[in-house]
Amino acid sequence: MSRPDPTGLHWRCLPFGALQPATLYGMLRLRSEVFVVEQRCLFQDMDGADADCMHLLGEQPAHGAGTPTLHAYARLVPAGLKFTEASIGRVVSDPALRGTGLGHVLMAQAVQTLMALWGPQPIRIGAQAHLQGFYRRHGFETAGPIYDEDGIDHVEMLRP
């Protein structure tokens, strides 16, 4: 499943087994750059769930035969794997593109793609607490108390 976007990024959604090595490397590099290095959070990013998820990639097309550059990523989690409901996790955009609206484009693509894959349904996320306002703009509402996950305040949010 793929489509172009007004930001100039090309969006693809792939199962884990279809990720080519360079794409997988770019995905793990971006997740590590933001979640481990930038946020100074030591946690097990490769948690064993990736193989059962779909992977949404927002890429700048390559020139010639090169590899596309990954600028945005989200992991789409089927219902029953992390929560009873389907979920969106590991939502991350290239730090160099912050403030451009890319994060909002990414979330809109993630919700739309999840619904296209598995049909209309509630989506539950474990959001970093300071991003509640961001996720509210995409239809999510706080659905529980703040809790600590790997040293960062998180909160469950639900999009009915």
Image (cartoon, grey):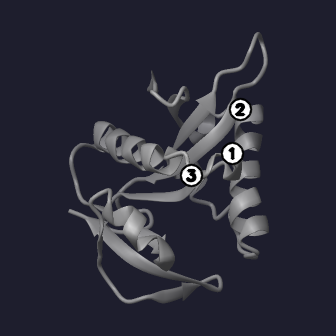
In three-dimensional space, the C-alpha distance between marks 1 and 3, rounded to whole angstroms, equals 21 Å
Left or right? Give the position of 138 relative to 64.
left
Q: Residue furthest top?
A: 64
Residue picked out by circle 1: 27
Q: In the figure, 46 relative to 6: above or below?
A: below
In three-dimensional space, the C-alpha distance between marks 3 and 2, rounded to whole angstroms, equals 19 Å
Name the mark on residue 69: 2
In three-dimensional space, the C-alpha distance between marks 2 and 1, rounded to whole angstroms, equals 10 Å
Residue 8 percent coordinates (x, y): 54, 26
Residue appearing at x 43%, y 62% in the figure = 81
Q: Tell me if residue 18 can be seen.
A: no
Residue flagged by tag 2: what amino acid is it? Answer: Thr
Residue appearing at x 41%, y 46% in the figure = 110
Residue appearing at x 30%, y 65% in the figure = 140
Q: Quadrant of the N terminus?
A: top left
Residue flagged by tag 1: what amino acid is it? Answer: Met
Residue flagged by tag 3: what amino acid is it? Answer: Gly
> How dense is the environment of label 3, judged by Cα within 10 Å: few (below 14), some, or many (20 and up)?
few
Q: Are marks 3 and 2 in contact (CB under 8 Å)?
A: no
